[in-house]
Amino acid sequence: MIDIASPCSGWRRVCPDAERLARDAARVALVDGFAATGFTSSTRVELGITLTDDAQQLQLNRRYRGQNVSTNVLAFRAWEPETHAPSGAPFLLGDVVLAFETVAREADEQVKPFCNHVRHLIVHGVLHLLGCDHRREADAVTMERLETSILAKLGVPDPYHDINLSIEPEPVFT
């Protein structure tokens, strides 16, 4: 089950389908991420996604990471290796939280359609929940390849290399 909360109205204003796109991106990321990482669960998986604003993201980043700045995506894993859900209970994977203003600013700066950037960050966050990381160069390359493969299935160009000049996204901030 994928539970989505969207307390920030900016998401619906700029990308009316943000919740559906986030859910679809998370589903594909879960399937492909499970296959790529070898992560298994014998029960259903629960994942939370919150589409919030920079103010709330700043509070979360300060509290849990000691960073006094907002960030585009945070992933809060709810499990540790060797953790198993009680019999019949869902496996709580964790939460992915996106900050509207930061995501919008990045999309504008990187000349990417806002909704594509949202899908990329959802995929990125879900892969973190599954244990993927990008601290080391080799891990970053592996994670980027997995992200681009998943995004291709969603019809999203490679966010690391593709620049589709035929698509001119409208600026989010005017």
Image (cartoon, rainbow, N blue to C red):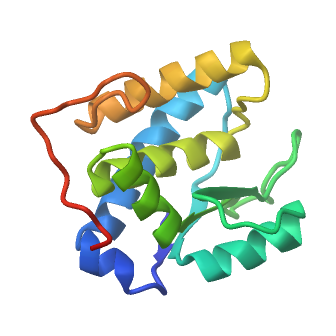
163 over 91 or under it: above or below: above
| Residue at x-position 49% and y-position 44% | 123
Quadrant of the image containing the C terminus: bottom left
Residue 81 place in picture, x, y as percent: 87, 40
Residue 87, position in %: x, y? 76, 58
Q: Position of residue 20 (x, y in %)?
A: 30, 64
Q: Is residue 155 left or right of residue 121?
A: left
Q: Residue at x 30, y 45 (%)?
A: 112
Left or right: residue 48 versus residue 23 is right
The residue lying toward the viewer, choosing from 138 and 55, is: 55
Please determine whether, in this image, residue 25 is positioned above or below residue 133. below
Of the pair 152 and 159, the residue shown nearer to us: 159
Q: Is residue 41 visible?
A: no
Tell me which residue sits at (49%, 64%) in the image: 2
Quadrant in the rendering for residue 62:
bottom right
Q: Position of residue 92 (x, y in %)?
A: 70, 60
Check the image and report above or below for 99 versus 82.
below
**Farthest residue, direction left:** 166
As drawn, is 91 to the left or to the right of 33? Answer: right
Residue 12, quarter of the rendered image: bottom left
Q: Is residue 51 visible?
A: yes
Q: Give the residue furthest to the front.
A: 174
